[in-house]
Image (cartoon, rainbow, N blue to C red):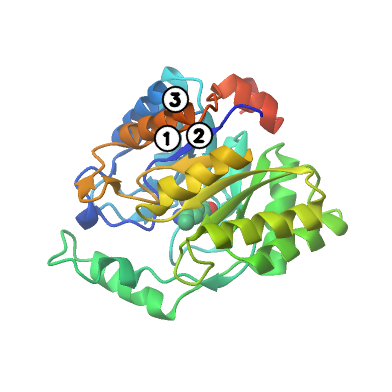
Amino acid sequence: MEKLIITAAITGSTTMPSQSEYLPIKPREIADETVRAWEEGAAVAHIHARNPVTGQPSSQLELFNEILDRIKQRCSIIVCITTGGGVGMTIEERVEVVPVFKPEMASFNLGSMNFGLFAATENLASFKYDWEQPFLESTRDYVFKNTFADMEHICRTMYANNTRPELEIYDVGHLYNAAYLLKKGILRAPLHMQFILGVLGGIGPTVQDLLHLKNTADRLFKKDYTWSVIGVGYPAEFHLGAVAIILGGHMRVGLEDNLRLNRGVPAKSNGELVAKGVRIALELGREVATPDEARMILGLKGLNEV
Ligand code: KMH
Ligand code: ZN
């Protein structure tokens, strides 16, 4: 079995600063957390930016620039920049990072969907920032927009910049969207897919759901693809990661998706979550890929081209 690629999703745009005091916000913090994740065994870092004062998700290129610069100076991790962005960002704002930074990889979301963030914080007693509660509440009436026109635009922008798309699959229909784009030559084989389980609006975070995605993908793409899994929340992050380790997939961990290291124990860094992923992999007899080994597995252009 090929080595395991561990992706660390460092901060994201869906977890709130009030949910964890360890969530990195400033460019320096996001870069420090990325380097720590790399030291612990992550081969890929999935990067979002936040307003350094308020912690609000941001599409500002200057913030991305500072984060990416700091990471590149200190380690060789593969950077996969988000084009999912955050609530309220336009497609143009979300995709701009691709032509500007020409990353080795970027996320590519495979369909429009409800994306409910309000439920995860229903038990929070108070909020640190004024924007958090209205932001979460606004997702009761929010559609994460990725129409066919949007997907075609994002996909063409990626190939024009030699950036490998990481296909974000939140439900079974998204696999059929990918199959259509592949048939039309908009997407190119082999695909790299990320199965995301546990977003309110997408498929649930169970092993049965993961196997259904995997079996459907095998049927549609004749096993000519690589895949990774995100289990949103705890313990899904590690349970579904373990299934991916056993089945030959790859795994993503990180504070974007899950804030707990163990039941009732907050994760104090992305590095802790990566280290746990490495421990599980080694216990199950699967070796962990370095960034350069991951570049070979994923067929990436390399750090000199970004
Ligand atoms: N927040 C994850 C559930 C993206 O950034 O484009 C999905 C994600 C997508 O990471
Ligand atoms: Zn993301």
Question: In this view of the protein, which residue sits in the foreground, 250 or 37?
Answer: 250
The secondary element bearing badge 2 is classed as strand
Task: Rate crowding at label 1 as few (under 14), some (14 to 19) or many (20 or more) other CA atoms within 10 Å.
Answer: many
Callouts 2 and 3 close, C-beta under 8 Å: yes
The quarter of the displayed image where residue 37 is located:
top left
Q: Which of marks 3 and 1 is in front?
A: 1
Callouts 3 and 1 close, C-beta under 8 Å: yes
Q: Which quadrant, please, contains the N terminus?
A: top right
**Is residue 97 depicted above or below 85 in this figure?**
above
In the visual, does 253 lie left or right of 144? left
Question: In this view of the protein, which residue sits in the foreground, 289 or 300?
Answer: 289
**Mark 1 highlights which residue?**
277
**Mark 3 highlights which residue?**
41
Question: In this view of the protein, which residue sits in the foreground, 27 or 41?
Answer: 41
User: Which mark sits nearer the N-terminus, 2 or 3?
Assistant: 2
Q: Where is residue 211 in the image (x, y as percent from the top left)?
A: 62, 56
Residue at 72% across / 67% down in the picture? 149
Callouts 2 and 1 close, C-beta under 8 Å: yes
Q: Position of residue 141 (x, y in %)?
A: 43, 81
Q: How far apart are the two marked residues, 2 and 3, measured between alpha carbons?
A: 7 Å
User: Which mark sits nearer the N-terminus, 2 or 1?
Assistant: 2
Q: How far apart are the two marked residues, 2 and 1, measured between alpha carbons?
A: 8 Å
Q: How far apart are the two marked residues, 3 and 1, measured between alpha carbons?
A: 9 Å
Q: Position of residue 169 (x, y in %)?
A: 61, 58
User: Which mark sits nearer the N-terminus, 3 or 1?
Assistant: 3
**Mark 2 highlights which residue?**
6
The secondary element bearing badge 3 is classed as loop
Task: Rate crowding at label 3 as few (under 14), some (14 to 19) or many (20 or more) other CA atoms within 10 Å.
Answer: many
Q: Which amino acid does label 3 sit on?
A: Gly
